Image (cartoon, coloured by chain):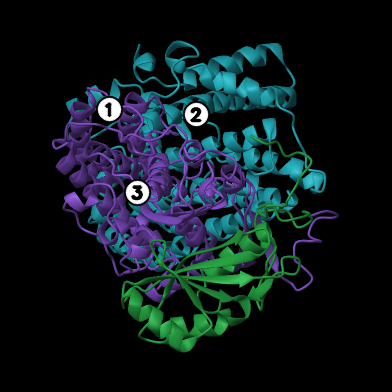
Chain colours: A cyan, B purple, C green
Amino acid sequence: MRIFLSYSFSALATFIHSFLAGLISNGMFLLVTEMVITGVSLIVFLVLLCFFLGYMERRVAAFMEIRLGPNRVGPQGTLQIVADTVKLLFKEGLTPDSSDKFLFNLAPFIMVVASMLVVAPIAFAKDFQLYDINIGVLYVSAVSSISVIGILMAGWSSNNKYSLLGAMRSGAQIVSYELSVGLSLISIVILSGSLSLGDIVKSQENGWWIIKGHIPIIISFVIFVIASTAEINRAPFDLAEADQELTGGFHTEYAGMKFAMFLLSEYINLFVVSAIAATLFLGGWMPFHIGGLVSFNHIMDYIPSSLWFFGKTFFVIFIIMWFRWTFPRLRVDQLLTLEWKYLLPISMVNVIFVTVMAIMGWHL
Amino acid sequence: MRGLIGEDILTEEGEFIINMGPQHPSTHGVLHLKIWLDGETVKRIQPNLGYIHRSIEKMSESLSYRNFIFATSRMDYLAAHVNNEACALTVEKGLQLEVPQRAKVIRTILSELTRLQSHQLWWGCTGLDLGGVTPFFYAFREREAIMEIFEETCGARLTQNYMVPGGIMYDVHPNFQKRVKDVMIQIKGKFEEYDNIMTGNVILENRLKGVGYLSKEDALSYGVTGPTARASGLSCDLRKSNPYSAYDQVQFDEILDTGGDCYARYMVRMREMRQSVSIIEQLIDNIPEGDFQAKTKNVIKLPKGEFYQRVETPRGELGVFIVSDGAASPYRIKYRSPGFSNLSALPIMAKGGKIGDLVAIMATIDLVIPDIDR
Amino acid sequence: MSTEELKNSITAILPSSTFDETGEFLNVVITSEELLPLMNTLRTKSEFDFDFLFCLTCIDWKDHLMMVYHLLSKTHQHTLVIKAKIADRNNAQIETVCNIWRTAEFHEREVFDLFGVKFINHPDLRRLFLSDDWVGHPLRKDYTDENMISL
């Protein structure tokens, strides 16, 4: 009963492990089997999640644009995205004749792999984490920037001038905004004193950082959301795609499933970025706790930790979607001005404030 | 581009050229721009026209004076009423025909409704071109109401063909007055919403302010007219200077701005929409009773001579030049279309800007390609 | 300036010009050689100040071509139509006015495309609407095409 109330997934994991250990005696084999099971279930989970995000984006867009959105295929249009995927599957996977075929076909996979790798250290619920790396924050910021290679590769190998322009824009953009993302992550690391995402979540047991950290952390949160929106190439920072300027930018030449993989990686990125924001600033799976109020905290614990995590993540996702459907796009020089003249200096000063706050112990 | 990757990206002179269009989302049709780039900066632009040239001028030479008007609905398809009106006015000028007052007022109301819906479409498309998709749907919500008025009045939504020499083809629908009044109330309430979602937005202001500057002298020299020229401070509203139909009976302001940039053009059009509503409101209660069409002969023959009529379309000055040799069809027709001259100023406006600026400039000079190509 | 004053001033500059007042505007008929000096005067002299060329086109009168320039002065609010007669249809050419009014550049290209009038000193005289290998000039009255149908 106690275990059930804590909604811990460790019991489930232990059960599966002991069940498999009974079947497979070789330790090496056991490890590989478990890894394959984890990998497959992760990929299935992420693909289903992207289906949902695709559906959610269209409904949110429709809501913003005073229209209905998909509501014909399946109940409330939920199967629309499945129908679209089937359509994309049957489309011809065209490779332009004069493109660099190897890089052209490799690029979508790099994009998807790069976005899926970032999922590893994220804590989805209490005791439900693929791998709690002790340098989790560093890992996240390092791996997430691999996707720029995929974009550059796609843009260059397409042998299309629009794609090339889009790729160059994207390169400049991701490299710039990486700095602000990093600095706003660091402010949490300073306060929690750990790079591990698991520890960061645990450090928010008596209140989330966005509440405990006063104004400097709110500033970091805002900067993080802005900069990471830019880093994942979403409107109003979608200059690499820029339909109206570059007709699709780096993925102009892609069709069918290869194009779908770019979409997949975009949605995984969206989820990952929101999950990181939720974990670092909004307490991850940690329920809403107020230090000292034991009975209140106890009631909050009855809500499953996974619900907390996904609730917060989808809140951030909704904010990022909200940006997309209400703002016009920035121009390329304004984009870089925003980063180098505003976000970066502000976050640098902010880090100093956070450091002072951490040393003086002013945070709650 | 052919051969290996990276080979033919630059020309022999080391220039980077991209072709924008004829299929491109922000050229609003089949316009083809050849752009010389230096990184993201536009060095030179060469418009390439003719992808939708249908030779309406040549065609009209073998059509009767009743029929040639209908071809003009396909020119500037967002302002079919105004195009038809221009042609009808020219023929009336040739026949020295006095149009009944009722027809004049109805023509003016429909022209202003046309201007409103054209500007609304422009507003939505500008949002779309700058990367914000949502304004498009807000614009279309009100535009739809106007299109329904057109549909009820003359059966067509886009190519109305309602103006005939001597007046209008049929009398308006009995619902017309009530419906127009309702729609005007609806639209007036939405202007604030338009401003909230677009006008005050920081990103939008940054995208438009100081971009695509056109001086008053250049506007005049390039023959730029309409809101695009008025944003440069060039007074050119033909409704004021050469009133036709019932424009001499209404009070309205000619909207002028001195900015000359994309933002000025944006604001001029936003303010013009309010003026159009005011014109319609002044006229809608005062539609005189009487004939809606003057008597004309079955086969219209214009006397020998040349007739020119200028009208103000949502995009600028439309001139219809008819040369008659006394036969039943025009000897020569020339349409001086507003978009054609406005486009010719695009290369100087966009020079030195970024690709994103070029899109903003094309959006704010409000190009309609069939109007340019004819 | 009134029509009468315009007539007198233009006669003073160009005695050979003839006038036609039947239409709405005052028409001045000249020959193609006289065009450029007259246009320059009309644009630069402050009493004329024709700063807006609002229409430029051509008419094919079967035995000759007639260039038509509609001019307007924004300062004086007077209008004038200049007609330049090109007698030689087969080798039609006339001076360009696009150094005076920039808008003429596109309009002259259109006339070149559809009427085959060559504009001397035009900066970029190419076909505007039709493809470069098109044969003939469609708005001429004697233009025929095997695909043409009469309505």
The answer to whether A89 is drawn above or below residue A188 in the figure is above
Please name the amino acid that badge 2 sits on. Gly
The answer to whether B186 is drawn above or below residue B268 in the figure is above
User: Where does label 3 land, which residue?
Assistant: B96
- Of A108 and C115, the residue lying toward us: C115
Please, what secondary structure does the residue beneath circle 3 have?
Answer: loop
Do callouts 1 and 3 point to residues on the same chain? Answer: yes
Indicate the position of residue B266 as horizontal and vertical percent values: 34, 56
Q: Tell me, yes or no, whether the two marked residues, 1 and 3, touch with CB atoms within 8 Å.
A: no
| In the displayed structure image, the side of residue B202 where residue C131 appears, left or right | right
Indicate the position of residue B120 as horizontal and vertical percent values: 34, 43
- Between the residue at mark 1 and the residue at mark 2, the CA separation in whole angstroms equals 47 Å
Which chain's residue wears label 3?
B
Q: Quadrant of residue A32?
A: top right
Q: How many marks?
A: 3
- Of B64 and A140, the residue lying toward us: B64
Please, what secondary structure does the residue beneath circle 1 have?
Answer: loop
Which chain's residue wears label 2?
A
